[in-house]
Image: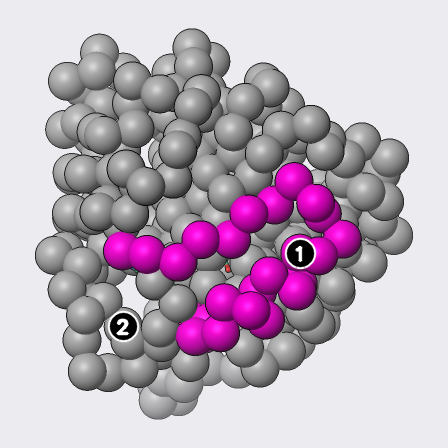
Amino acid sequence: MRWIRDRKTSVTSHLPVDEDTHRQSQLRAEYLRVESEIHFAAQSSVVDGFWRTFEANAWYEDGLATLKNQGFRNTQNFIDAYDAAVREATSLNLDPHIRWRAHIFESFLRSAKPGTRLELGTAHGFMFKFALTKHKLDGCLDLGSEIILVDKFSQNSVDPVSGELLDQMNVRYANDIQAVKSTFQAFPNVRVEQGDVPEVLSSLDLKTISFLHLDLNAANPEAEALEQLWPKLIPGAFVLLDDYGFLEFLPSQIAHDRLASRFGKSICLLPTGQGLLIK
Ligand SMILES: C[S@@+](CC[C@H](N)C(=O)[O-])C[C@H]1O[C@@H](n2cnc3c(N)ncnc32)[C@H](O)[C@@H]1O
């Protein structure tokens, strides 16, 4: 999708030219088919015009190409908070290109009821750094609810199903808990804890949880954690599952769906790939 611009980076394709051109024409054909059905009374030149608008103006980021208005990403507070997270809560100061996911995370965190906010899988703390900085800039920072950030703090990758440690390293993960603590020093209600999920949970002295962010990139430890924590989640608590809709984490989706149905709940798949479960 070489033709779509993120407006910060120009997207270049890694596909061979022939295959790339073929994919682009398939996409165009699919676009025209769908839009012609929606605008069944319109002439084909009008529908062609829609395509040109899409081609010229669509945003691409994080697996999403859309014409939808993303006004949130242009506000100065969003830009400043996101830049702060890139600068202070990534391994290499590289933009992870997850603005819409970050927006959703921040919005649900802001609306969560009083109670503990818990994240399992923090790495450098990108999401919380972004959200808390944004809340501070917006004048709505909640210092009354404790925030607990948990990670194993090693750069070993994990098996996407079992969660077992692999020899392969992931440079995006964090190995220095002290550095992560100092990233959050301006937020006295944040506690950073090191340990393996789910084993570490019993040592955290968890009371009522109103917001749970699961981002371990591993199905089994996430599902075990959710099962263990369910009684501590208050009614109306938000559970945001970062990996839920990503193809490579299909086992996570299956495990969480199975669990949710045992709880008499269902998980909403958001277009960003996040899953949202409300207790
Ligand atoms: C995708 S990263 C988290 C990103 C983070 N939420 C953010 O906002 O940048 C996944 C993290 O989960 C951690 N992790 C994976 N399995 C774990 C486990 N069983 N216990 C504790 N941490 C684990 C990894 O060390 C890694 O830092």
Secondary element under disc 2, as helix, strand or loop, is strand
Q: Tell me the magenta residue range.
A: 172-196
Secondary element under disc 1, as helix, strand or loop, is loop
Of residues 110 and 232, the one nearer the viewer is 232
Residue, x 42% and y 10% (percent of image)? Answer: 235
Would you place residue 45 above or below residue 4 in this image?
A: above
Residue 214 seen: yes
Name the kind of residue labelled 2 in the image. Answer: Ser
Give the side of residue 89 with respect to residue 19, left or right: right
Q: Earlier in the sequence, mark 2 or mark 1?
A: 2
Q: Which residue is mark 1?
A: 184
Q: Residue 157: which numbered mark, if any?
A: 2
Residue 132's quadrant in the figure?
A: top right
Residue 279's quadrant in the figure?
A: top left
Give the side of residue 148 with respect to residue 114, left or right: left
Of residues 9 and 65, the one nearer the viewer is 9
Cα gap from disc 2 to disc 1, whole angstroms: 24 Å
